[in-house]
Every structure is written in structure tokens, then in C-alpha cells.
Amino acid sequence: MITPLEIENKKFSKKTLNGYNAEEVDDFLDDLVKDYEILYRQATEGQDQLEELNTKLEHYSKIESTLQNTLLMAQAAADELKNAAQKQAEQIIKEAETRARESTLGIQQEISMKQKELEELEKKFDVYKAKMESLLISQLELIKEVNKDD
């Protein structure tokens, strides 16, 4: 790209016949230099801004990539934690079911033992009752004999 300084320093060879008016050419070139300087400065600033924006874009792209990786790692950790919690919950349920079965079995055995004790006590009561009836009958017989003698 031609710089404004190159335009300003440009010299034309002069022709004596039918040439351009040197003053008009110089004035035009001066105007052209001013306008071109503005455009050149704007283009340079635009290029600088573009480079700065590209640098920022690259920076933000790296941040985005880092955030995506972090998000993936967090998701994986959350899934792992969820699976571990699920396994722990299943283990707790299994242990509770096992304890409940053992407790139920223990209670059933205790009920069975109490039923046997009840049956034994009922048998003992029946034996005691029979002995009492026998004693009462013998006592009644004794009383009858005593009454006969009188």
C-alpha cells in the first residue's frame, strides 16, 4: 500500500507543452495526501483493532475451551458421585432387608418358643388341676367317712 508520505514526495516530470498546471497538481496532491492520510490512519487503526480483537477472541476461545473441559469434568464427577450414591443406597437397602429378615426370623423363633412354653404350662396346669381334683375328692371322701362315724 502506498503511504501518504510517498504520495507527498512524488515528483512528476514537467512537460513544457500542453502539460498540467503544476500548482493545480500540487494542490490536488495536497488534498489527496490529506484524504489518503485519514484513510491510511483509519486502515492502520482498523488493522490494530482487528489484531486486538483477534487476540481477545483467541483468549476467550481458550477460556471457553477451559470452561467446556471443566463442565465435562464436573459432569463426569457428578455422574460418578450419583452412581456411588446409588450403589450406597442399594447396599443400605440390602443390609436393611437382611436385618429385617433376621429380625423376623428371630421373632418367629421367639414366638415358637413362647408357644411351646404356653403348651407346657397348659399341660402342667392340667396335671395340677387333676391333682387338685383328686385331692379334693379324697378330702370329700374323708369328710363323708367322718360324718358317717358321727
Image: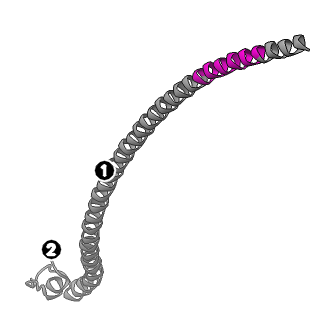
Rendered image quadrant of residue 56: bottom left
The percent position of residue 96, horizontal first and vertical second, equals 45, 39
Q: Nearer the viewer, residue 70 or 136?
A: 136
What's the residue type where badge 2 is placed?
Met
- Residue depicted at 77% across the width and 13% down the height: 137
Q: Nearer the viewer, mark 1 or mark 2?
A: 1
The segment highlighted magenta reads 119-138
Instruction: Look at the image and say whether residue 121 sits in the magenta stretch.
Output: yes
Q: Relative to residue 117, is residue 103 drawn left or right?
A: left
What's the residue type where badge 1 is placed?
Ala
Q: Residues within 10 Å of mark 1 (few under 14, many from 20)?
A: few
Q: Nearer the viewer, residue 72 or 50?
A: 72
- Residue depicted at 59% across the width and 20% down the height: 119
Image quadrant in which the N terminus is located: bottom left
Q: Residues within 10 Å of mark 2 (few under 14, many from 20)?
A: few
Image height check: is 9 above or below 111? below
* Cα gap from disc 1 to disc 2, whole angstroms: 54 Å
Residues tagged 1 and 2 counted as in contact (Cβ below 8 A): no
Rendered image quadrant of residue 45: bottom left
The percent position of residue 99, horizontal first and vertical second, equals 44, 38
The residue pinned by badge 1 equals 76
Q: How is the image coloured?
A: one colour
Q: Secondary structure at mark 2?
A: loop
The percent position of residue 70, horizontal first and vertical second, equals 30, 59
